Amino acid sequence: MTPPYDIAVIGSGPGGYVAALQAAQMGAKVALIEKDLVGGTCLNRGCIPAKSFLAAAELMHGIRHRSRAIGVSAGEPSVDWPAALAHKNGVLEEQRKGLRFLFDKRGIDLISGEASFEAPGRLVVRDARGGPNAVHAERIIIASGSRPSRMPGWPENERVVTSDEALDWTALPASLLIVGGGVIGCEFACMMAEFGVRVTVVEMLPRLLPLMDEDLGQELLRVFKKRGIDCHPATEVEDLVTGGDEARATLSGGRTVEAEKVLVATGRRPNTERLALDKVGVRVAKGWIEVNDRMETNVPNHYAIGDVNGRMQLAHSASAMGRVAAENALGRDRAFVAPSPACVYTFPEIGAVGLSEEEARTRDLPIAVGVFPFAASGKARAYGDASGFVKIVRRRGTDEILGVHAIGHSATEFIAAAGVLVHTRATARDVAEMVFAHPTMSEAVRDAAEASLFECLHLPPPRKVRVRV
């Protein structure tokens, strides 16, 4: 048996490694258990590799479109896929080295293997050789993450893949059918279309990005159509067969789509089946571990953070949960209550925080909505990228900002500042009276706040007022 630890963390993704670093910084003896590569899904099969490819695609888009708009001549760009793949892999390895360096400097014991529970506070870790090793800790933080869902009954071969496999393609397909128009599906559609892949997106719900504000999905659909991406919202794939060098999908309504590859992007499943949670009595709902705002499970001294608790499947949310869990495990009192921004790394980028207009209306809140288009932004026009808008949802009566939603150049960069506004319950009047630097993309947040107050000087007087009394 290894020496007892103050805290053992299962999983080294953005939730787990932050929890381990936080606990070690507070003086705890920490074991960090990882069955695969350090960094979890975000670093190895999600956020970072996808952004590496999206950076290349956005640069190509800029050369093709923005450069001409601002007077720069350039030849037709092309992607060197092996070089892009090598760049991606190099980035990942450097990031993994950085994490291992931090673990070493903080005195964290990194244990390779797959963990499962034997009893409360007791884990069995099986390494690559299958040998069981016991790990005992006074407190345990579960950060085992999630994996892509697959469609029951569909073929599972080289033609029908998830994002895990697609990020390691050694060659680009000529055509791609993406099933699912959420964040992952839209990012892949944007990326692959720029690389010259013929892309079709099928989304069962009525719009792209169905979990975000409706106006964001509608604007992205307009952009995608302009780029020749074939989108089918409110459509289901009724049948899928593979054979030869293609897959053939039958859509609701009878249309068929043929593609070299099919990307299934319909959600994720928790990695809980192999943890033996029943041995300690941790409560789950459909596989997701139930927690309170302190990230505590129903079993004392056992916490669950990140994707595995199903509350918010975002890397930065997992990191925030990791800090909360570690601090609570070591005697502090913290809750995970701050709003988490959601980002989509298409181009134009999308950032959102707080309530959408639909959520506010569902709660029957009295609201007013202000929208400022980037077509009226000097910075956006100067940079040759004036698509999109900033939208603010304001509560009438108190003027509290309930939500901020943006689609446009650099939207993911300034949405964090909008999160501060929502978290501190700032009012639209507060924002309208702030001094924003000019010219910037972020000053559109002030203009949208003014628009929600029907006072935006940079827009014509509103003919229609979007309010709910």
Image (cartoon, grey):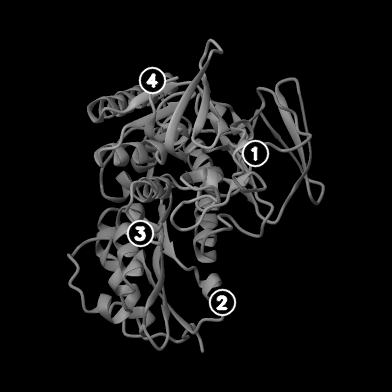
Going from N to C along the chain, the mark reached first, 2 or 1, is 1
Q: Give the Cα distance between marks 4 and 1.
A: 42 Å
Q: What residue lies at 19% left-to-right and 68% top-to-bottom?
A: 436
Residue nearest the viewer, comparing 114 with 264: 114
Going from N to C along the chain, the mark reached first, 4 or 1, is 4
Q: Secondary structure at mark 3?
A: loop
Q: Secondary structure at mark 4?
A: helix
Mark 3 or mark 4, which is nearer to you?
4
The three-letter amino acid code for the residue at tag 4 is Ala
Q: Give the Cα distance between marks 2 and 4.
A: 48 Å
Mark 3 or mark 1, which is nearer to you?
1
Q: Which residue is mark 4?
A: 86
Residue nearest the viewer, comparing 415 with 301: 301
One can see residue 12 in this view: yes
Residues under numbered marks 2 and 1 in contact, where contact means CB atoms less than 8 Å apart: no
Return the mark for residue 416. Answer: none
Residue 421 position within the rendered picture, expressed as x and y whole percent measured from the top left: 31, 68
Q: Which residue is mark 2?
A: 363
Residue 466 position within the rendered picture, expressed as x and y whole percent measured from the top left: 48, 82
The three-letter amino acid code for the residue at tag 1 is Asp
Residue 322 position within the rendered picture, expressed as x and y whole percent measured from the top left: 39, 45
Going from N to C along the chain, the mark reached first, 3 or 4, is 4
Q: Secondary structure at mark 1?
A: helix
